[in-house]
Amino acid sequence: MASLVRLLRIRLDSQLNPLQVFLAYDGADYCTRVARYFRVEPEQADHYAVFFARNAANSQLHSSDSQIAAMLDVTLNERLAAQEKGSLVIQLSLWLEGQLPEGEPLLKDAAAQYNMSERSLQRRLGEESLTWNQLVERTRRTLVERHLKISGTTVTQLAFLLGFSDVSSFSRAFKKWYGISPSQFRYKDP
């Protein structure tokens, strides 16, 4: 998003600011830097987005070139198509974060949530070189790394937050991921 805004400020107007910026990350320092760069307070969301005034879309770029514009248009469309594919994985990861405390999330529930068949969901994950189990495991690893930074979180709490049926299952999975137990991971020297 920053690269896009920088390009627009260089090619259109150095004072151009988006109307809205949405972030899927809420670190205070990060949000402060985003607000300073984009010159607008970011809003929390489950996705990243930047919105400009409609009249900015009709602005002519300084020293515009129709051939370069056509090439950039093709590149942008390819990137948007790739982003659209990736966005399902991001949405599923966020959905999984909310489902894990309730237990092992099921593929059929995710498929129903996103209005597709289980086979379609598996195919879409396959396009991203992922299986359902890999996505669940990747989401769990992301969450465990986030939660281990919070002091006072117990291994038992982590196990249940991540949807494991018992602490020993969590400990086995953790040891497979990191080669050490959760307690050793937390207390190892940096």
Image (cartoon, rainbow, N blue to C red):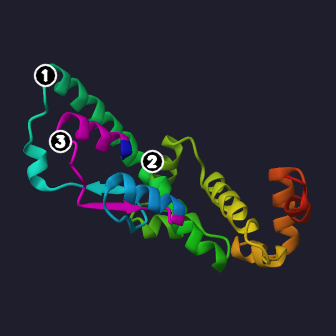
Q: Residue 65's mark? A: 1
Q: CA distance from mark 2 to mark 3?
A: 31 Å
Foreground tag (2 vs 3): 3
Amino acid residing under circle 3: Asp
Q: Is residue 17 magenta?
A: yes
The secondary structure type at the circle numbered 3 is loop
Q: CA distance from mark 2 to mark 1?
A: 31 Å
Q: Is residue 64 magenta?
A: no
The secondary structure type at the circle numbered 1 is loop
- Residue 32 against residue 128 in the figure, above or below: below
Does 126 sit left or right of 7 as displayed?
A: right
- Residue 72 against residue 19 in the figure, above or below: above
User: What is the magenta range?
Assistant: 3-28
Foreground tag (1 vs 3): 3
- Decide: marks 2, 3 in contact (CB < 8 A)? no
- Which percent across, then down, holds residue 12? 17, 38
Q: Which residue is mark 2?
A: 86
- Which percent across, then down, holds residue 135? 61, 54
Residue at the spot x=41%, y=60% of the render? 47
Does 160 sit left or right of 166 as displayed?
A: left
- Residue 24 against residue 120 in the figure, above or below: below
Amino acid residing under circle 2: Gly
Q: Which residue is mark 3?
A: 13
Q: CA distance from mark 1 to mark 3?
A: 17 Å
Q: Residue 57's mark? A: none
Query: Within 10 Å of the Cα at label 1, are there few (<14), some (14-19), or many (20+) other Cα atoms?
Result: few
Does 104 sit left or right of 70 as displayed?
A: right
- Decide: marks 1, 3 in contact (CB < 8 A)? no
Query: Within 10 Å of the Cα at label 2, are there few (<14), some (14-19), or many (20+) other Cα atoms?
Result: some
Mark earlier in primary sequence (1, 3):
3
Query: Within 10 Å of the Cα at label 3, are there few (<14), some (14-19), or many (20+) other Cα atoms?
Result: some
